[in-house]
Image (cartoon, rainbow, N blue to C red):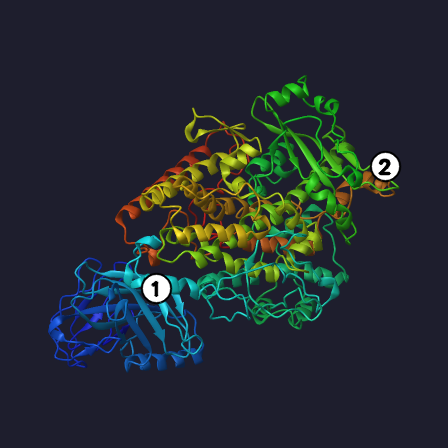
Amino acid sequence: MLVSKPLTSFQSTFSGSALRRPSRLNGVVGLVPFSRTIQTRPLVRALLSDDKTVESAKKSSVEQKDVHGSLVSGSSAKEVRALVTIRKKIKEKITEKIENQWELFMNGIGRGILIQLISEEIDPVTNSGKSVETYVRGWLPQPSDHTQILEYVADFTVPSDFGKPGAVLITNFHSKEFHLLEIVIHGFDEGPIFFPANTWIHSRKDNPESRIIFRNQAYLPSQTPPGVKDLRQKDLLSVCGNGKGERKAHDRIYDYDVYNDLGNPDKDADLARPVLGGEERPYPRHCRTGRPPTKTDPLCESRIEKPHPVYVPRDEAFEEIKQETFSAGRLKALLHNLVPLIAATLSSSDIPFTCFSDIDKLYNDGFILKDDEQTELRDNLFIGNMMKQVLSVGQKLLKYEIPAVIRRDRFAWLRDNEFARQALAGVNPVNIEILKEFPILSKLDPAIYGPPESSITKELIEQELHGMSVDKAIEEKRLFILDFHDMLLPFIRRMNDLPGRKAYASRTVFFHSKTGILTPIAIELSLPPTPLSSRNKYVYTHGHDATTHWIWKLAKAHVCSNDAGVHQLVNHWLRTHACMEPYIIATHRQLSSMHPIYKLLHPHMRYTLEINALARQSLINGGGIIEACFSPGKYAMELSSAAYESWRFDMDALPADLIRRGMAVEDPSVPGGLKLVIEDYPYAADGLLIWSAIKEWVESYVAHFYTEPDSVTSDIELQAWWNEIKNRGHYDKRNEPWWPKLATKEDLSGILTTMIWIASAQHAALNFGQYPFGGYVPNRPTLMRKLIPQETDPDFDKFIQNPQHTFLSSLPTQLQATKVMAVQDTLSTHSPDEEYLGQMNHLHRRWINDHQVLKMFDNFSAKLGETEETINKRNKDVRLKNRTGAGVPPYELLLPSSGPGVTGRGIPNSVSI
């Protein structure tokens, strides 16, 4: 017997009653009388709430069969009730609304949704869990303020010896899927039993198998109640697939594949891209889609272009509110791109910025369209209906927001100390390292790349040290380096052969003064050696005359361009997005949803597979935005693959990374046991607070579930999970000796802390500052189009006459700049449905039935609240020059909380954008 209803009042199938619940959050359902009688079975009273059970219905003479055909008599049975909560789409087409009415009718007559209740106890006859089943029944709901939420109430008659329910099987007989939020069972002695779902239930016509939903009780494999043990294994097998066939939109299959869909050789030979993953080009694996190969290259998978979606398992897809945000971002990008699109149309070629006021106009004025340009654009098929509406409403188009880096001080980007500050407190604060020895040496093959010694000499550095020797500066830990030389030099020749690209492999040396100020003192820019040119390394210092000052600006711009490319392709995309994906796939394949570690990791996997699929479709693909706007061009992902060769999981832990780079030393006398070499290193200082909070939460959680000495090694699901991550997800690294062992709860805590850190805080630090720092092109150009003019070059006189023109014409063109600005703006945006570290989505508030764990989580949340207060205090501490001072923006990228939009703060639980 069932009732379908939104959250406010509705008519019930029960005699003289309707269920009403004014708020979804409080979980209380009360009974309200109404005049119309539908159901003939009399009901004494039912109060559904989070802390009260359903009182027994009067004994019914109606007999009910269990799923095995045994009669369940009323005298030896009790009535229990299932409250089933379903979410409809926010926006529906007319046809979908008609289908919904039909589905409501089918539910009303008991032919839409079959619910099977499975006990934790074994039925001795069938040797599987005891079970009873019923169909959802109900009538059309009344309108309410929460029309996207429907609730159905089903009654079961269960034997008195049924035991506790451990699982629910759902069979959807409708023609389309529906989104199940949760099922709550009332009527058992222990109180309401929760089955959190938040999942799409496929139609039986797409897949005849029923969906299995477990109760919110965490069990290690060895603790699984006997009645649901087989279901635990069956549910895991159902998501693994067999590695064959093309995946369909309704599938929930998690499997591995190489990056074989970045190119599109069938469209254009110039869009062919090598497969990433394998001995020649190692790379993490992504979720397999199984699309057929291209006609041109059997090793490459055929592409799906926008607006058609790339397959991800059904529950990994963006929810509607997230889709709206991303669509709005794409619209914003299209609007922004009109600025250069018009200019390019009028000039028949892409044009550079000619003066700094061209850049300022992007923020101050927007762009005014002339009547003929509006007409031309309205006729352009590239412009959608929404755009045409904007064009028809008025002349002025949208403006860019002023990026944080110039909001307080328009000229900060010109200063050396700001250039250095961003290595510690910018969007890419993870590459700076201590200079440990001199001379600086390359590890590349000298037969190919020339002598390994850097051209930065002791004498040159000592000119900038005001009397201190290099040896003394190294001893006192005052010299630091940003070294992209070995990573980039093997690609420079090919990059510079691309039209409109000119790059160097760079090294930058910094000096940290006794007053705590970090300053760049020398930049080395290298080209591959050629038979015609013996000189391939150029060293620059800031100088004191006008010419060297402008050349120094150009050298810094080349360093920033390299930094932007390494940040995007290596630190951001590879080390957070791509490296997380195998952990997520393995978690779904090897850990049951009732496994405590699955429950711990679940919030940190949200949306990652979907955003990565979108990236393969539009950002990192051949001819995509990354190739168009960053220095490596078509070799971008090959460079990312080369960087993966030096990737190590054990170095992804923040303390290990800081120690490896020489930015911290172990010191038992300080909190956390780690002392920063540069105390005013905002990313590291704030990051260690977040790391400590995550570590404390994870350790307490793991200790709660793994109480025996051998409980980690004897956990078959956990061991299979870790083995699969190493041997399938990161297959090209499977034989590395540095993989942590998984034998103790300390091992497990370390692995999990690292994963959660990467998914949350590490990604936040690298992602949400992209527009605040990169939105002003001169501060962080994503590519350079000219080499620095030498005195023997024909263009050197032009540089002397107009150095500003040389500088601006070396930067990305207006089209390149505004395109990447729009993408950075979108990627720096928090969605309204974002879930932040230490916060609990109300839909997931019943994620686990364990008061001790919930108390631990409250402690974790409180610790993060304290961390936020500490960071805010640091941002007001005048002694910390890298986060305070005239025009200096505070360092907020690791503040845990945020509102929606481009805020430059906030740590989402997962890599969700």
Q: Please provide percent x and percent y for residue 352.
A: 73, 52
Cβ atoms under marks 2 and 1 closer than 8 Å: no
Rendered position, 681 above or below 640: above
Is the N terminus in the top left, top right, bottom left or bottom right quadrant? bottom left
Give the secondary structure at mark 1: helix
Residue 68 point in image, percent of width and height: 26, 76
Residue at the far top in the pictured view? 467
Q: Give the label on residue 230, or none.
A: 1
Distance CA(mark 2)–CA(mark 1): 71 Å
Asked if residue 119 shows in the view, the reply is yes
Residue type marked 2: Ser
Crowd class of label 2 (few under 14; some 14 to 19; many from 20; radius 10 Å): few
- Hey, which quadrant is residue 183 in on the image? bottom left
Instruction: Using the image, determine if residue 899 lies above or below residue 513.
Output: below
Tell which of 508 and 274 is nearer to you.
Answer: 274
Does any portion of residue 396 appear in the rendered image? no
The mark nearer the N terminus, 2 or 1, is 1
**Image position of 580 (left or right of 537):** left
The kind of residue tagged 1 is Asp
Where residue 92 is drawn, which disc sits there? none
Q: Is residue 246 left or right of residue 642?
A: left
Would you name the residue on which mark 2 appears? 534
- Residue 547, image quadrant: top right
The answer to which image quadrant residue 260 occupies is bottom right
